[in-house]
Image: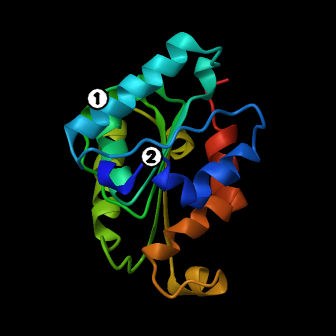
Amino acid sequence: MYFQGVGANMVEDFGVEAIKYNSEMIVLSAQLSDWGETSANQAIDLTEYFINHYNIDKSKVYLHGYSGGGETGSLVMGIRPELYTAFLLTSSQWDGDLEVLAKAKTTVYLATGESDSYYGSQPLKNAYNKLRGIYESQGLTETEIDRILVLDVKDQAYFTERGYTDQHGGGMAFAHDGTIMNWLFKNDST
C-alpha cells in the first residue's frame, strides 16, 4: 500500500533474485494504492511508460505478484495481458477476468502452499481449472495448455526445508526456486 513507502516491496526477494536471470533487467516494484482496479491500472500505466520511454524488449516483459500484489497482477491479466510475456502469481488468489487472459494466451504460473495461511490453495486451484476449461473449449491440446498454464501447489515440507513454518510467508521461497524462476524467464513465445 502507498502508506508503506516507496521501495517497500524491494525488501521482498523477487526483485533481487530476478536480476540474477538477466543483468540488464529493470525491476519495478509498484506500490499498491488498493487491491483493486486502481492499482491494476497503475501497474499497466507504469509498464506502458517504461515500454514507451526505455529500450525495452517487448518479448521480455514479466509480471510477478505475491499476496495482494498477486490479486492486483491477476486484475492486470484480466485487462491487458498482452503487455506481458509471462505472469508469476505466488501465494495469492485470482481476481481478474480469465476470459480476457485466455484470449491473449499469456503464460501463467500459479504457485502456492497447499495450506497457505491467508488464501488457502483452493482459490488458485479453482482459477486454474476454470482457465484450463476455457483453453480446452478453445481447442488447445493438453500439451499446448501445459506450456502456457502451470499450477504448482507445494506441501509443508517444501517450506520447512527452506526455513519457513508459515506457507503464506514462505511464498518468498518461490523467488529462490530455480525451476519456477527459470520457467518465468525462459518461457517466451520464440
Q: Quadrant of the C terminus?
A: top right
- Label 1, on which residue? 79
Q: Is residue 92 left or right of residue 34?
A: right
| Quadrant assignment, res 53 | top right
Viewer-closest of 179 and 64: 64
- Label 2, on which residue? 6
| Quadrant assignment, res 62 | top right
Q: Is residue 133 left or right of residue 57?
A: left
Mark number, residue 22: none
Viewer-closest of 182 and 45: 45
Viewer-closest of 10 and 147: 10
In the rendered view, tell whether residue 57 sits above or below residue 154: above
Earlier sequence position, callout 2 versus callout 1:
2
Evaluate if marks 2 and 1 touch, with contact meaning CB atoms under 8 Å apart. no
Q: Is residue 64 visible?
A: yes
Eye-nearest disc, 2 or 1? 2
Residue drawn at (69%, 53%), measured in percent from left and top? 17
Viewer-closest of 135 and 125: 125
Q: Is residue 137 visible?
A: no
Q: Name the element at disc 1.
A: loop
Spatial distance from mark 2 to mark 1, Cα to Cα? 25 Å
Residue 52 is situated, as x and y percent measured from the top left of the image, at 51, 11
| Three-letter code for the amino acid on which mark 1 is drawn | Ile
Tag count: 2
Residue 78 is situated, as x and y percent measured from the top left of the image, at 29, 34
| Quadrant assignment, res 160 | bottom right
| Three-letter code for the amino acid on which mark 2 is drawn | Val
Residue 171 is situated, as x and y percent measured from the top left of the image, at 50, 68
Residue drawn at (56%, 29%), measured in percent from left and top? 61
Q: Is residue 128 left or right of residue 155?
A: left
Q: Is residue 176 left or right of residue 89?
A: right
Residue 151 is situated, as x and y percent measured from the top left of the image, at 47, 58
